[in-house]
Amino acid sequence: TLSCALVQSLKALRIFWFHLKKIGFEECLVQMFFIHTFTGMESGVLMLMALDRYVAICYPLRYSTILTNPIIAKAGFATFLRGVLLIIPFTFLTKRLPYCRGNIIHHTYCDHMSVAKLSCGNIKANAIYGLMVALLVGGFDILCITISYTMILRSVVSLSLADARQKAFSTCTAHICAIVFSYIPAFFSFFFHRFGSYTIPQSCHIIVANIYPLLPPTMNPIIYRIRT
């Protein structure tokens, strides 16, 4: 998410300083690829953090033997690879489309569906694949997070000491806040594009689309600083 925010910040500075408000089509595809890849990676990192909390609370004495450095490295690489492989088809699906509806994107960055909607061709494949990726990435990660926290809750409730329960809950507070700030704006933006095009004002689309890449990197340092 920090990388997404950096991409947008550099683009914004270029507009404010040099009044360069245009972006080439190839540049737009590259920007779209990196923004969606890093967003998918962020979701994977949140899921891995939930699994980390699960092992730390439910198996504290075996934590170092379960989550070894090679396991952590492989999990991180798998998250990166998943993000790249699932987002690469976006660029090809978008590039193949014929464009004849103008060249103005009603967003501050090149979002997949915002670019596809400029096409005069059939974008059904783009919409279906976008939905599949959202379910594969977001749906799978949220399912893993939900299962992890369900197991954590069962383990914490079974503790006899109130101090131990309090400590276990406080360990997860910052991560839960990070999940809320990351997923809620992202899902609002996703469903606005697909189901709210005719009922929700364009300005709301733009605001939400800007919030979901920028809010998590803004709030996460504050959340973890307060926790620390």
Image (cartoon, rainbow, N blue to C red):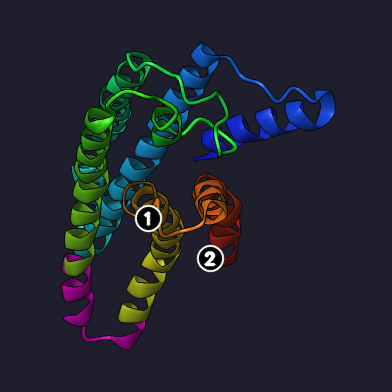
Camera-side residue of 31 and 158: 31
- Tell me: 171 left or right of 65: right
Query: Pointer 1 and pointer 2: residues touching (CB < 8 Å)?
Result: no
Which circle's residue, 1 or 2, is located before the other in the chain? 1
Q: Amino acid at mark 2?
A: Arg
Q: Which is in the foreground here, disc 1 or disc 2?
A: 1
- Tell me: 7 left or right of 15: left
Horizontal and vertical percent position of residue 17: 83, 28
Vertical position of residue 51 compared to residue 19: above or below: below
Residue that protrudes farthest toward the right in the picture: 17
Range of residues picked out in magenta: 151-163
Q: Amino acid at mark 1?
A: Gly
Residue 77 bears which disc, if any? none
Residue 160, quarter of picture? bottom left
Q: Residue at x 37, y 24 (%)?
A: 120
In the picture of the structure, the residue carrying the numbered disc 2 is 227
In the picture of the structure, the residue carrying the numbered disc 1 is 196
- Tell me: 62 left or right of 174: left
Q: What's the magenta bit mostly, secondary-structure-wise?
A: helix
Q: Is residue 161 magenta?
A: yes
Indicate the secondary structure of the residue bearing disc 1. Answer: loop
Horizontal and vertical percent position of residue 207: 57, 53
Horizontal and vertical percent position of residue 113: 39, 35
